[in-house]
Image (cartoon, helix red, strand yellow):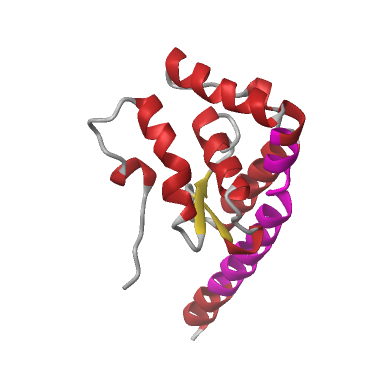
Amino acid sequence: APVVWVDALCADPLLLPRDALAHMPAYLCRCRRLVVVCGPTVADRLWVVAELYCWRASGGSLAAVDMVVAGPEEAAAQRECWADVVAAIDAFHVMWTDAADGAERDTIARGVRLAGVGYVNEVVRGYMDTAMACAAAAGTEAERQAQAQADAAAA
């Protein structure tokens, strides 16, 4: 049976953030696909960066990553949001990220130093092709829906 693990909904709420963070690689290792619900700030949160890094470090393939924009449904606004997502990934540097609290920041920062700042940056920027492909697919779908609505209105 399919199993879905959504970090914000499934993580044990009794765990301290640093303990939940320690479990993240184990959760991600059990996943066959990764769905990133994102917006222009996708690369701003250190926790998200840790998840993106852990996915790749645990053997997760970029081919098994889907990205969806959480935001407006109107086609032009979606295109703008996707452009912002791609730009955020393209300009990513771990030093510009922030964490919910100091303990989370310190824990993830230790992992970033261990992996290497440059390597973490490279891994996160590696999601750009996936973001661009998902943006193109979303644009094609939005155009198809707009055409269907125009056809229905004309009929």
Q: Residue furthest bottom?
A: 155
Residue 84 vertical position relative to residue 4 in the rendered view, above or below: above
Asked if residue 92 lies in the magenta stretch, the reply is no
Instruction: Kindly identify the residue that appears in the image at 35 percent across and 59 percent down.
Output: 4
* Extreme residue toward the top, this view: 102
Judge whether 151 appears above or below 143 on screen. Answer: below
As rendered, which of 43 and 154 lies closer to the eye? 43
In the picture, the quarter occupied by the N terminus is: bottom left
Residue 92, percent from left and from top:
70, 33
In magenta, the rendered stretch is 120-146
Q: Residue furthest left?
A: 14
Q: Is residue 49 left or right of residue 24?
A: right
**61 left or right, relative to 145:** right
Q: Residue at x 69, y 45 (%)?
A: 86
Q: Is residue 124 magenta?
A: yes
Q: How many marks?
A: 0
Q: Position of residue 109 (x, y in %)?
A: 58, 21
